Amino acid sequence: MTTRADASTTALRVTLRFFAAARAAVGRDTLDVELPAGSTIADALAAVTRQPAAPTSHDADAVAHAEAVFRRCSFLVNGVAVTDHARTLAADDRIDVMPPFAGG
């Protein structure tokens, strides 16, 4: 049985959704990642390039490109804009990774 104290030390799963250039850099629309409790948006982004299923995980140039794209992105966590990459995540959070969009 998991107690409340145990839950704080277990891993959490979050879903990242990628749009436009972020999708192109990662090579997929969505990715679920498992992270330690207390992880941040920055930790989730770092985990993206370490995922075996991510095309960027084995190519240093692709990793550098994805990281450059992420630096320009805006983020929504559960639909709310977040500017602090040190924001702590909770289990089942949904992170939208959105590069700048042109329009007009």
Image (cartoon, grey):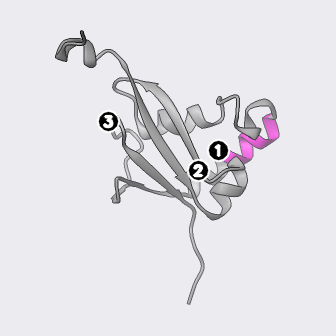
Q: Quadrant of the C terminus?
A: bottom right
Answer few, some or many: residues within 10 Å of disc 1's Cα (few below 14, many 20 plus, some between 14 and 19).
some
First reached walking from the N terminus: tag 2 or tag 3: 2
Expressed as whole percent of the image width and height from the top left, the position of residue 53 reads: 70, 34
Expressed as whole percent of the image width and height from the top left, the position of residue 17 reads: 53, 52
Q: Is residue 94 above or below residue 51?
A: below
Q: Which mark is residue 90?
A: 3
* Tag 2 secondary structure: helix
Q: Amino acid at mark 3?
A: Ala
Does the magenta run of residues contain 65? yes
Q: Amino acid at mark 2?
A: Phe
Residue displayed at 81% across by 34% down = 59
Answer few, some or many: residues within 10 Å of disc 3's Cα (few below 14, many 20 plus, some between 14 and 19).
some
Q: Quadrant of the N terminus?
A: top left
The residue singled out by tag 1 in the image is 67
Marks 2 and 1 sit apart, C-alpha to C-alpha, by 5 Å
